[in-house]
Image (cartoon, grey):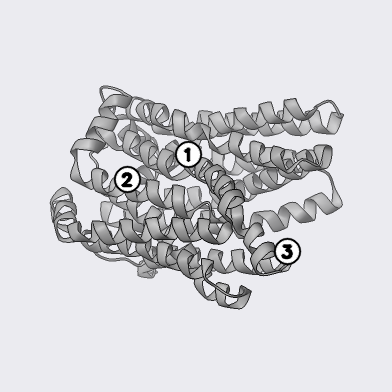
Amino acid sequence: MKLPHGMRAFRYPAFRRFYAGQTVSIIGSWVQSIALSWLVYRLTGAATLLGLTAFLTQAPILLLGPVAGTLLDRFDRRRLLLIAQWSLAVQAAVLGTTVLSGLPGVPWLLGLAAIQGVIASLETSARQSFLNVLVPDRDDLPNAIALNSFLMNSGRLIGPGVAGFLLSHTSEGVCFLVNAASFLAAIAAITATPGHASRRAASGHGQGGILDGIAHARTHPIPRTLLPVVLGVSFFASPYVAIMPALVRGSFGGDAGTLGMLVGAAGLGGLLGTATLANWRRLPRLPRLTLFSCALAGASLIGLALSPGPWVAAVFMPGVGFGIIASAASVNVLLQATTEERMRGRMISLYLAGFLGVSPFGALAAGLLADAVGPVATLALGGTVCLLLGLVLMRRIVALSRQVADALGA
């Protein structure tokens, strides 16, 4: 049966198995994330510790992501991915067992959150760079990355609901054990990857280390142009989530339902962005989507900041979600498609460090700025930076498209 163009990566059995396993695992990861935050707040009542918990689970990728990329370019990616998945399963099992026994205090929970962040630095980079093993045809790689991004955003919508149900009927410890079990589905799918594909991943061992990856990013025009887009969007646009409660309550006089409606609208925009990328046909023209999306995220944030009420704000939220997800995911596609095998792990790790590792620092800065000048000015400033970044880089769009075509041999 011929698959639609937007689902063409599913014609590879290894990708289908991987996708199914990751679906279970990602929902489990969201269950743990929500349950851990709930437990920390239930024990302490301190919102500051909620931010610290999130910081410990996300920030390590900024420092350790490039190290992970070097390992991925030197060793078998499937083996490293399996090690990381098993490690996360063990971490979740230890967390669940100790919570059910009533032993841990908050320092223990924060320590395990930090361990999770360290392991995730390797796992996230390995999972992203493993896609080209599962989908050997480079023309289908953008679709695989877009479908993977769609899965990440779907997990963001489904996982918290599952966590809420489990927390209502069981306990935090059970949620952690559910997450530990969910990794088994992903591990089984990765283990089933054909041996020749695994050897192909291992054959791209790169020489050198982190500094060689940074030098490659500085001297090659595609990463040199596109990685700043990821950094800008991650630091100035993505942290909008952290200050949305202040905007909703302080400016709109809304409640939790208003917040959920607005964040959900952004989520729908993100899903639309991944659908657009999944159906994209010409890679040399993809930089146009990248820079347009960066500018769209900025313009939408400015519109959000200037909105007089929640219903006007809801008009701009899909543009925020679309812009952030489409710009970041399209850079992921372009880097994976145009980077030679020996450097792919390091480029993907730099991308993830920029997108996932910088975001917690952006959220911290946005929170401090919002306390000083208010959420409206903070959102407007972040939106202005992203809008200008997209417009300034548009001047290089023709040259960038040509460089992508040359790298693809088109």
Provide the residue designation for mark 3: 256
Contact check, label 1 and label 3, Cβ < 8 Å? no
Q: Amino acid at mark 2?
A: Leu
The residue singled out by tag 2 in the image is 227
State the image coordinates of residue 172 (x, y, percent, origin top left): 79, 42
The residue identified by callout 1 is: 357
Where residue 136 appears, as percent x and y from the top left, is 30, 48
User: Along the polypeptide, which appears first: circle 2 or circle 1?
Assistant: 2
- Camera sees residue 123: yes
Q: Residue 239: x percent and y percent?
A: 53, 51
Q: Residue at x 39, y 69 (%)?
A: 1
How far apart are the alpha carbons under marks 2 and 1? 13 Å
Disc 2 to disc 3, how far (Cα)?
35 Å
Q: Residues within 10 Å of mark 2 (few under 14, many from 20)?
A: many
**Quarter of the image holding residue 112?**
top right
Distance from disc 1 to disc 3, alpha carbons, whole Å, reads 28 Å
| On screen, residue 6 above or below 236 | below
Q: Residue at x 27, y 56 (%)?
A: 139
Q: Quadrant of the C terminus?
A: bottom left
The amino acid type of the residue labelled 3 equals Ala
